[in-house]
Amino acid sequence: MLRLFQLTTLVLISSEMLAQGKSLDFNEAKLVDLARPIYPLAALQKRAESWVVLTAMIDSLGTPYEIRVKESAALESGLRKGFEQAAMRSLQNSTFEPSRLNGEPRDSSFTMLYPFFLENNKVEITQRFKRRQDNFEQALSEGVQEKAELFLNQIEELGAFNRSEYALLEADKYQYSLQFFDDIDARADHLYRALMVENLTLNEEIEYPTLPDEMTRYLRLALLSTEIERSRFGEAQEIAQMLSTSGADLSAFSTALQRIKDIKTDETQYSVFGSTDDGGDWGIKLHKRTMYLDNLGNALNELRFYCQHEYRALTFMEGQTVTIPPSWGDCFLVINGAPNATLELIQFRSDD
């Protein structure tokens, strides 16, 4: 069985609306009729699994166009291509209710995750994957970077065969980055990918077991620590809630989590540094209601606020301070600009 997950919808807004910075009644694009994707025969015969993230534009009539593969699981190239083509054909032949701004239909971008997971599939680690992973873990324990990198590259070249192998590969990349490189953003990316299936299906009726519970808890604890270190306090609170629900012991984080709770409403000022991706976007769950954005390199264009009760888009202006009214509810901020633009987001005073 295949379940689809909508990730984001970004609407195209005229420069006049951006300049005005006024409140907008926004309704995101919605899937109306899904053209059911056909599971690739070669993959089905091998019981291989994958997932594909597609981006597309949805026009004002609800028709998809400019469909592209944003990311897909690291399978061997032949199987990966089959999954990508199946997802693209499905999206191409599906219909949508277009996004609307103040009641008017608008073209918008749409991001969709296609998880090609087989229900009741007994997910097992293949021997060829396990041998290479054992070699990698041995090199990691010896602290020999060259050997660890060699075996990690061998695992990547082999490719993941199912959702568990993909999650383990990303967990291996996290361990490698943790031990040999000081790149906290890369570590966070690997952790989010390793936990993607568990996090997306957390509240779903159908579950797709991917990792042992103990490893899932370990990775979530590592992600909680990482997000606290990155000062991404909104995300840290969400991860802590997941861990608490699963019965994890959070006593080691009690002081930090209480401080994060206090920061949300006190006068503390703090910074989060980031850079836009290849598509020019960088996002964060906001923790406070007043912020200042500093452009550290390359152009920044727009600030898009996706809130519980409001949508607003603003043109980026140097020196601008933005305050979000409490009536908007919790907000996720997407900053758009040139690819790899660096920035500092300073969050401070709250008027709650």
Image: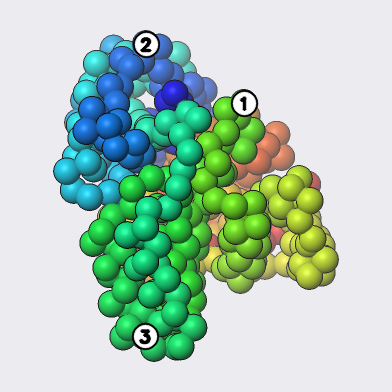
Between tags 2 and 3, which lies in front? 3
State the image quarter where residue 257 is shown. Answer: bottom right
Judging by the rendered image, the residue that carries numbered circle 1 is 205
> Helix, strand or loop at disc 2?
strand
Name of the residue lying farthest toward the front: 127
- Which quarter shows the N terminus? top left
Q: Earlier in the sequence, mark 2 or mark 3?
A: 2
Q: Earlier in the sequence, mark 1 or mark 2?
A: 2
C-alpha distance separating marks 1 and 2: 22 Å
Q: CA distance from mark 3 to mark 1?
A: 42 Å
Mark 2 crowdedness (10 Å alpha carbons): few <14, some 14-19, many ≥20: few
Residue 321 pos. (x, y %): 55, 56
Which residue bears the numbered disc 3?
145
Taking the spot 28% from the left edge, 49% from the top edge, the residue there is 75
Residue 229 visible within the image: yes
Residue 332, how many percent across, how many down? 55, 44
What is the spatial separation of the Cα atoms under label 2 and label 3, in whole angstroms?
50 Å
Answer whether labels 1 and 2 touch (C-beta < 8 Å). Answer: no
Residue 267, percent across and down?
76, 64
Q: Could you tell me the amino acid type at mark 1?
A: Glu
- Residue type at mark 2 is Asp
Q: Which residue is mark 2?
A: 33
Question: In this picture, is 142 found above or below 329?
Answer: below
Name which residue type carries label 3. Answer: Gln
